[in-house]
Structures are given as structure tokens and as C-alpha cells.
Amino acid sequence: MMVIGTFRPTNQGGWEGSIETLSIDRKVRLVPNDNRRSDRAPHFIVLRGWSRVGEAWRARTREEAPREFLRVELDDPAWPAPLKVALFPDADGAKAEMVWRRPPREPRSSKLQTETAAIGAEDGEA
């Protein structure tokens, strides 16, 4: 996993900090979502200035001693897909690190089979 951001808690119960990678250098805030209308609604809204750029949900690791963290999804129209990251607070909650892990690559043989099936479907094969 790669640390791509550092955050500190806010007085309003959220987090603020910076995301820094080779192509991203932005300050963002995670603001509590006071309008959750269902259990699936995000716990936090991610803002850059006043623009909504993502959402975050509370989660727990599956380790023997589970850790609380936020599952964060950031999005931008210029990106091909949302960026999925996690925000892990330290033990005393005084700071948190945003981490990212590259998704596993699809095995080449599976990708080739998918492409072949798609081509066959275009040619009228089922």
C-alpha cells in the first residue's frame, strides 16, 4: 500500500488534509453526512472547496484485531474510473493516513477470453 495523503480531525467530526501523488496535489475535507436516508448512504461527503468530489463509508478490517477506517471513493470527470482509497486513523485519532493499493491485474488469458467473447457477440455468435 502507498500513503497518498495525511489528514487531521476537524472540530465538526470530519477530517481535512491533502492528497499528494505524481498527478494529484489537492486539499480535501471529509464532512459528516447529516442527511443519511439509508444504511447504504455515505457517512461522509468529500469536498474540495464547496465541490463534492467523493464519498466515504465507515468500515472495519477483517483482521483478528479489527481496525476502524473509512472506505473512500473519489471521482473526477477526467478520470476513467473512481479512485478507491482508505483512510486509516492512528491509534489516538490525532491524525490519519490515506492509502491506495493498485487493483490486481486481470490475468491475460481471462482478458483475452473476454475480448474474444465480445468480438464473437458482435459477429452474431452467442
Image: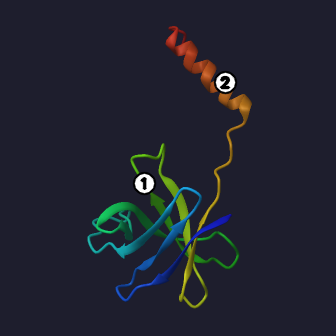
Quarter of the image for residue 56 reads bottom left
Q: Position of residue 116 (x, y in %)?
A: 63, 19
Describe residue 64's horizontal placement relative to residue 16 as left or right: right
The residues bearing labels 2 and 1 have C-alpha atoms spaced at a distance of 30 Å
Amino acid on which disc 2 is placed: Gln
Q: Which residue is the site of mark 1?
A: 75
Say which residue appears at 38% left-offset and 84% top-offset: 13
Mark 2 or mark 1: name the one nearer the start of the chain: 1
Q: Residue at x 54, y 87 (%)?
A: 93
Report the colour scheme: rainbow
Percent of width and height locating residue 14: 40, 80
| In the image, farthest residue toward the top | 124
Residue picked out by circle 2: 113
Image depth: mark 2 or mark 1 in front: 1
Q: Between residues 2 and 92, which one lies in front from this camera angle?
A: 2
* Placement of the N terminus among the 4 image quadrants: bottom right
Q: Residue at x 57, y 15 (%)?
A: 119
Q: Amino acid at mark 1?
A: Asp
- Residue 11 spot, x, y in % from top left: 37, 89
- 10, above or below 79, in the image: below
Give the SS element for disc 1: loop
